[in-house]
Image (tube, rainbow, N blue to C red):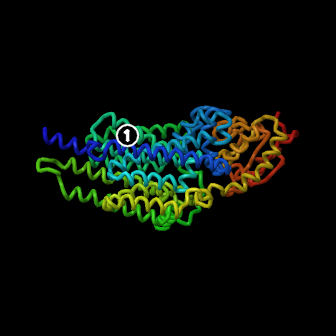
Amino acid sequence: MAAHVRVVATNNPTSIADTRTASRVVRLVTALGAVLSLAAVIWYARLDLTLSHYDARGHLIVARRVIDSLTPGWQQLGAIWLPLPHMLNVLPVQWDWSYRTGASGAALSMAALLIGLRALAGYLIRSTLSWSIAVTIPLVILLNPNVLYLQSTPMTEPLLFGLALLAAASMDRWLRHEDPAQTSRTGAILAALMLTRYEGWFIAAALVGLGAVASPRRVGRLALYPAGAVVGFLLLSWGSTGSWFVTSGFFEPNNPARGSAWLALRQVVEGASNLGGRWLLWLGLAGIVSCVATGAGRILRGPSRPSGSWTEARVDVARALVPLSLVATAALPLYAFFVGHPTRIRYMTPVVVAAATAGAFALARLPRRLHVVAAGSVLALAVWSTPPWDLQAPMVREAQWERPYSDARRSVTAALAEAWDGTPIMASMGSLGHYMQQMSAEGFNLRDFLHEGNGSLWRAALVTPRRYVKWILIEESAEGGDVLATLVRANPAFLAGFTRTAESGGVALYVRTKSETPQ
């Protein structure tokens, strides 16, 4: 009985940190996070930056078209982007104001990140026994201007951040408790993470791997959840595209790092350094070393008592390495750049979150009397080196790359709106989805467009467009032009019977002449 009591006392959260202090820390982080998050949402909305990134508009499009489409249905979720962010926004985005402003997507991002930071605060107070570290690290993450901007938009990264932090905290609980209910909770979070962004696949795999190290007997049931998420996504992909997994056709392989693992690594490190500062990467590296040292030390000590087993040691090692699971997110941009994907600074924002989280465990190694000073210094350094409201932050700048073209296309929109007769407009959603969302300000709905998501209708129109549509929009410049521009170059007769009536911002508008009206 005495041995049993000792095990329970070791694993009971109340023996790790005072429950009241932990509760206060979580409430403080939640309150501060909510105020800062909402302020940022309002700030960027007033600057008209909520939807400046073309992918922000694209995510609204995917959610909206499930209902607002020539061919509505679950197949509209598509198979390139993972479906959970769009599934959560399907109904809210049908409200025209929400769709045009991106409000529901931004609210989802803000809530997701806030839940994740709340979970991180609780995890850190349990793991480091330091209220100052548990308060500081979530604020370092939130106040990074790139993270703060992303959580103010309908982008999917904030949902990844929130679920990744929630998964790490939940996995720590799973490792400490043999509770079927906890297995279900942790498994559900891992499944949600797997359905949000592909970085989540690497994080979930790392966490399940740690579960296998700690408890091979229990990990099978836990692994069923993320495995089920993958199977569900593959089925969705097959049902919507006819392919089990779409791996090509959505980028031009023009990265200089193509085929060079070293150059790809340099791009990831430089990108993360630009986002969070080189000091944060060094802090994260120190945290990684600290976590590994803690795990190694636990192995060297062996069982905690003569009659004990290695089970407790394996659990302790796995718990020590949980923060490293977030570092696995770097594997995705590494692979993407290696195969030629263009560099995108936002792909490294998860590395900033991972570095800050790992860095907490480096701070925890300091003498306890220095925690408040060290944590305060880290927060001050973060705010000084990467000011939260910096409009020149890399992510904010990247989000505005397309803005000059977006502004220029307004003349094309005006020309179409003046002459449009309500019949379908053919356009590639893969290239002009963000423009379709922009056109909603002039009263255009997604059901007014014929695009790839319309399946057989689209394929038939690619053969003889004049039999199906009167209007065609073609992206002619970005990345060499869209699928319609490529088709026109290969077969000029594709536009037989159509007249070019407007062009600007890389987009051209064609209208079918009356003499070519199909019989």
Quadrant location of the N terminus in the rendered image: top left
Residue 179 in the image: state x and y as whole percent. Answer: 29, 36
- One can see residue 258 in this view: no
Q: Nearer the viewer, residue 9 or 414?
A: 9
Residue 206 versus residue 377 in the image, above or below = above
Q: How many discs mark residues in the rendered view?
A: 1
Please give the residue where the numbered disc 1 appears in the rendered image: 186
Residue 269 in the image: state x and y as whole percent. Answer: 48, 64
* Left or right position of 467 against 274: right
Residue 189 in the image: state x and y as whole percent. Answer: 42, 40
Residue 7 versus residue 253 in the image, above or below = above
Quadrant location of the C terminus in the rendered image: top right
When asked about the image quadrant of residue 418, the answer is top right
Residue that protrudes farthest toward the right in the picture = 515
* Left or right position of 433 against 408: left
Q: Nearer the viewer, residue 141 or 510?
A: 141
Q: Secondary structure at mark 1?
A: helix
Q: Residues within 10 Å of mark 1 (few under 14, many from 20)?
A: many
- One can see residue 432 in this view: yes
Residue 180 in the image: state x and y as whole percent. Answer: 31, 34
At label 1, the amino acid type is Thr
When asked about the image quadrant of residue 218, the answer is top left
* Left or right position of 404 against 82: right
Residue that protrudes farthest toward the left in the picture = 306
* Residue in the picture at 64% in, 45% down: 57
* Residue in the picture at 64% in, 33% down: 94
* Residue in the picture at 63% in, 50% down: 44
